[in-house]
Image (cartoon, grey):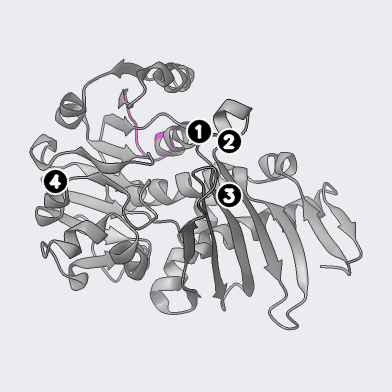
């Protein structure tokens, strides 16, 4: 990149980074992590005691991709009432050779698209090839990104959905209709009974899916739990599922696995990095009846990977702004 600070706004990010771009970037960085070529720094995420907000930092370094940076932001639950998304963040990219700030990139769209890419990668590598019914637990801002990305990985015929606030479900229904998929609002138990793939994308602090509701052969992508105390599924599901994660250290401390670990239901060695499957070092799903689970906590390297794509493409297409710092 040339001299000066590159600024890439939210609108530009949405123009230059597609779901396919995000999938490629996230898949590559998961593979690099599993090889030891990229690593995340410890996450800082705290309740700030104001506006019920969670705020923190995710950062890391991808030696293979020469990407260094940090995402700063969090979750403000009252933002929807203000016409804003609840998740707010900004990504800072630095030159790994000099430490100089290279780019300032809007993080809201990229957070949604990279989170969807993460579950999409897990579906591509772990879900049954003949999966036909997609279950969606959650209908917030990120749910539509999840639905669109998942639909690119399997020939789904139907979407079943549940949300604690059912009045939000029509938004998912509209996207399903746009994608040519049947849509049905169901109970949580019925969702488990019908679904071949389940994506949970909520901010819950209690289990929303119980072990007995999950049928054999299901792939579950748990995408909402990224903070200590948050929870979306019954920890007992880990005792019957083959578990994978974006990063084991986060999965066991701030991810869905934190509860199974704390209860002594599983050990850390029973969780496999999704990158091992991507790299061909782990077979992934071994039988049609196997239940697979992906604990997607959201790692800083995902953000840096898609932000790098946004910065590169925005500059190439003449859509970014440069300023002297």
Q: Which residue is found at the position 44% from the left and 38% from the top?
A: 146
Q: Which residue is found at the position 32% from the left and 50% from the top?
A: 230
Q: Which residue is mark 1?
A: 141
Q: Secondary structure at mark 1?
A: helix
Q: CA distance from mark 1 to mark 2?
A: 7 Å
Q: Which residue is mark 4?
A: 288
Work out whether 228 lies above or below 196.
below
Q: Is residue 311 toward the left or the right of residue 143 in the image?
A: right
Circles 1 and 2 in contact, beta carbons < 8 Å = yes
Neighbourhood count class around disc 1 (C-alpha, 10 Å): few under 14, some 14–19, many 20 upward: some
Asked whether residue 182 is drawn in magenta, I would say: no
Q: Secondary structure at mark 2?
A: loop
Q: Which residue is found at the position 44% from the left and 56% from the top?
A: 298
Q: Where is residue 84 shown, x and y percent of the image?
A: 62, 33
Q: Is residue 21 toward the left or the right of residue 101 in the image?
A: left
Work out whether 197 lies above or below 31.
above
Viewport quadrant of the N terminus: bottom right
Q: CA distance from mark 1 to mark 4?
A: 32 Å
Instruction: Specify the segment rendered in magenta.
Output: 151-158
Neighbourhood count class around disc 3 (C-alpha, 10 Å): few under 14, some 14–19, many 20 upward: some
Among the two numbered marks 3 and 1 on one chain, the one whose residue lies closer to the N terminus: 3
Among the two numbered marks 1 and 4 on one chain, the one whose residue lies closer to the N terminus: 1
Q: Where is residue 118 shown, x and y percent of the image?
A: 43, 51
Q: CA distance from mark 4 to mark 2?
A: 38 Å
Q: Which residue is mark 3?
A: 21
The mark lying in front, picked from 2 and 3, is: 2
Q: Which residue is found at the position 41% from the left and 33% from the top?
A: 151
Q: Where is residue 248 shown, x and y percent of the image?
A: 32, 68
Among the two numbered marks 4 and 3 on one chain, the one whose residue lies closer to the N terminus: 3
Q: Which residue is mark 2?
A: 85
The mark lying in front, picked from 3 and 1, is: 1
The mark lying in front, picked from 1 and 4, is: 1
């Amino acid at each position: 990149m040339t001299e000066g600070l590159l600024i890439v706004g939210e609108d530009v990010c949405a123009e230059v980074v597609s779901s396919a771009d995000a999938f490629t970037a996230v898949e590559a960085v998961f593979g690099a992590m599993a090889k030891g070529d990229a690593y995340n720094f410890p996450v800082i995420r705290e309740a700030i005691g104001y506006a019920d907000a969670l705020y923190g930092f995710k950062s890391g370094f991808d030696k293979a991709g020469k990407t260094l940076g940090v995402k700063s932001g969090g979750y403000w639950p009252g933002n929807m009432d203000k016409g804003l998304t609840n998740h707010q963040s900004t990504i800072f990219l630095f030159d790994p050779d000099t430490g100089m700030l290279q780019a300032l990139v809007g993080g809201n769209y990229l957070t949604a698209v990279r989170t969807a890419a993460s579950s999409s990668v897990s579906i591509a590598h772990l879900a049954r090839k003949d999966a036909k019914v997609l279950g969606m637990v959650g209908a917030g801002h990120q749910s539509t990104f999840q639905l669109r990305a998942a639909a690119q990985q399997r020939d789904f015929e139907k979407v079943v959905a549940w949300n604690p606030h059912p009045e939000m479900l029509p938004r998912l229904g509209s996207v399903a209709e746009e994608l040519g998929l049947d849509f049905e609002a169901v109970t949580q138990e019925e969702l488990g009974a019908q679904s071949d793939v389940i994506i949970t994308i909520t901010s819950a602090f209690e289990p929303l899916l119980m072990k007995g509701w999950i049928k054999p052969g299901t792939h579950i992508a748990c995408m909402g739990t990224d903070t200590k105390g948050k929870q979306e599924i019954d920890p007992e599901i880990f005792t019957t599922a083959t578990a994978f994660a974006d990063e084991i250290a986060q999965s066991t401390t701030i991810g869905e696995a934190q509860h199974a670990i704390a209860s002594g239901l599983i050990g850390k060695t029973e969780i496999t990095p999704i990158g091992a499957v991507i790299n061909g070092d782990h077979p992934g799903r071994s039988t049609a009846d196997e239940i697979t689970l992906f604990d997607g906590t959201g790692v800083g390297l995902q953000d840096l990977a898609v932000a790098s794509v946004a910065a590169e493409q925005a500059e190439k297409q003449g859509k970014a702004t440069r300023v002297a710092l």
